[in-house]
Amino acid sequence: MEIKLLKHYDAADQGRLGGFGYTSTMKYQVRKAVSDSAMSIHIERIPLAEPYVKEWQVEADDFELYEKMIPLGYSYGTYIEDQLVGVAITEPQRWNNTLMLWNLHIAENYRRSGMGSKLLKKVIGVARDAGFRAVTLETQNTNAPAIALYKRCGFDIEAVDLSLYSNSDVDDGEVAFYMKHYIS
């Protein structure tokens, strides 16, 4: 396995990595309570009665964005015998001195092999070397496997957006979690 600077990433590369999505047997339930004097958000990991399956396609405009991000020099690929098996596509956010992780995708037959952790640690090391103060990302409360990976790599949930995807995310949808790894 070799991790090296990503030079390109297109629909054909995506196709070779396989489906983009996840299956989760847990989720982080989010509840909001509001009174005249306070507001609180409670997050609790709970088991699901049925596995939650999410699959989606990366759209053409996503690849256009990746085409702009990759030349910035902070995106990496994991290769086995010159075959791309994982990507971490990132973008520097100069306004707040962070490196935003937009896409972390490991080919399905390599998931839970430690490859995602190694790729994240590479991104964190590159961010440290470049002087960024943190690496940030967004994921969903339903993606418990990814949240567990990010936590193992030193990320914490820093913010919640209760309506990023729809106006009823808290009740019956996905809630956006923003996670951050501070660079020490």
Image (tube, helix red, strand yellow):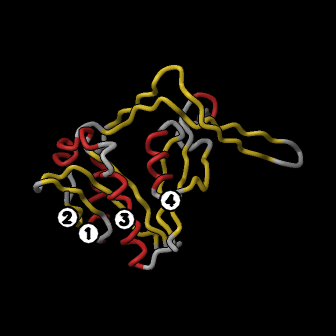
Q: Please, what is the three-letter code of the amino acid marked with disc 4?
A: Gly
Q: Please, what is the three-letter code of the amino acid marked with disc 1?
A: Pro
Q: Please, what is the three-letter code of the amino acid marked with disc 2?
A: Lys
Residue under label 2: 7
Earlier residue among tags 4 and 1: 1
Q: CA distance from mark 3 to mark 4?
A: 12 Å
Earlier residue among tags 2 and 4: 2
Kindly indicate whether the residue at mark 3 contacts the one at mark 2 (C-beta within 8 angstroms).
no
Residue under the image location 69 percent in, 37 percent down: 31
Earlier residue among tags 3 and 1: 1
Q: Is residue 134 above or below residue 79?
A: below
Earlier residue among tags 2 and 1: 2
Name the residue nearer the viewer: 34 or 133.
133
Q: CA distance from mark 3 to mark 1?
A: 15 Å
Residue 158, image x, y percentages? 60, 56
Residue under the image location 51 percent in, 36 percent down: 142
The local secondary structure at tag 3 comes to helix
Residue under label 4: 154
For marks 3 and 1, give the one nearer the viewer. 3
Residue under the image location 41 percent in, 69 percent down: 92
Residue under label 3: 123
Residue 47, image x, y percentages? 56, 28
Q: CA distance from mark 2 to mark 1?
A: 7 Å
Q: CA distance from mark 4 to mark 1?
A: 27 Å
Horizontal side of 52 relative to 105 (left or right) equals right
Residue under label 1: 71
Earlier residue among tags 2 and 3: 2
